[in-house]
Image: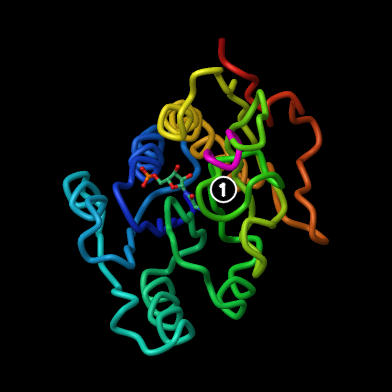
């Protein structure tokens, strides 16, 4: 049985489309059934609809509190019998109630090698720090921002003439490979959250959990 997945977005939704495309493979263990954007003008909403996925806006500005907005998101997830949630460029901090309710069942992708460069503008943070390698991380969502247990990471080189934009572009290409890979691990039960850590099923090649820098 394929896991029923909802994707939370705020913008263009290129990671969302990478998940949608991966899920077209007959043996992929998850199906994308719902896209929710907190911004009604997110271009990703139309892209999802064009791909045949139900997409809805839940405008955070229409809710007086974070908790009220999260309750509306929760109602949509429950109403669609969602089993796993993927945050993909979703730029809202969740209340700890919602993050805790979906603990072990909600993933996020972040464009840095966590725990380095949490929060906003991680590519600029990487350049300012002078690191030679950066990348992206898929982790389980916990109440603490960008701090949940890590499922998989991909590393990319930082080049001498990089700007935040060129680095973001290189990381984004890795994100599009990493997110479908990490969701497959979780949806198939190969990786799961247990006691605050990601536990991998025995017999899985450990090297499969990291993509190395591209030339
Ligand atoms: C991606 O780079 C994603 O990792 C990042 O926003 C971009 C969304 O692009 N997310 C965060 O920074 C979350 N803290 P997309 O809408 O094309 O997937």
Q: Secondary structure at mark 1?
A: helix
Q: Is residue 150 above or below residue 91?
A: above
Q: Nearer the viewer, residue 29 or 176?
A: 176
Residue at 62% across / 31% down in the picture?
134
The picture places residue 24, in percent across and down from the top left corner, at 35, 36
Quarter of the image for residue 23 reads top left
Residue at 53% across / 40% down in the picture?
124
Q: Is residue 128 visible?
A: yes
Tell me which colouring the rendered structure shows. Answer: rainbow
Q: Residue furthest bottom?
A: 64
Residue at 22% across / 66% down in the picture?
40
Residue at 45% across / 66% down in the picture?
92
Magenta region: 123-127
Q: Is residue 59 magenta?
A: no
Quarter of the image for residue 34 reads bottom left
The picture places residue 174, in percent across and down from the top left corner, at 50, 28
The picture places residue 185, in percent across and down from the top left corner, at 61, 41
Q: Is mark 1 within 8 Å of ligand 1?
A: no
**Which residue lies under the disc numbered 1?**
187
Pick the quarter of the image with the C terminus.
top right
Q: Residue furthest top?
A: 215
Total count of labels: 1
Q: Main secondary structure of the magenta part?
A: helix
Q: Is residue 183 visible?
A: no
Q: Residues within 10 Å of mark 1 (few under 14, many from 20)?
A: many
The answer to whether 9 appears left or right of 189 in the picture is left
The answer to whether 146 appears left or right of 57 in the picture is right
């Amino acid at each position: 049985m394929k896991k029923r997945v909802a994707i939370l977005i705020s913008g263009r939704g290129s990671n969302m489309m990478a998940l949608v495309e991966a899920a077209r493979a007959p043996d992929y263990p998850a199906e994308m059934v719902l896209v929710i954007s907190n911004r009604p003008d997110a271009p990703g909403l139309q892209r999802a609809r064009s791909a045949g996925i139900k997409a809805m806006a839940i405008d955070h500005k229409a809710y007086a509190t974070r908790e009220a907005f999260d309750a509306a998101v929760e109602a949509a997830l429950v109403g669609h019998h969602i089993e796993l949630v993927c945050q993909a460029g979703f730029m809202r901090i969740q209340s700890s109630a919602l993050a805790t309710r979906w603990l072990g069942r909600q993933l996020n992708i972040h464009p840095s090698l966590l725990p380095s460069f949490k929060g906003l503008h991680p590519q600029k943070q990487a350049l300012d720090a002078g690191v030679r390698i950066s990348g992206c991380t898929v982790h389980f969502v916990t109440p603490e921002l960008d701090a949940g247990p890590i499922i998989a990471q991909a590393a990319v080189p930082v080049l001498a003439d990089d700007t935040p934009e060129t680095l973001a572009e290189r990381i984004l290409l890795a994100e599009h490979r990493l997110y479908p890979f990490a969701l497959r691990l979780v949806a198939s039960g190969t990786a799961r959250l247990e006691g605050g850590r990601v536990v991998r099923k025995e017999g899985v090649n450990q090297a499969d959990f990291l993509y190395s820098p591209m030339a």
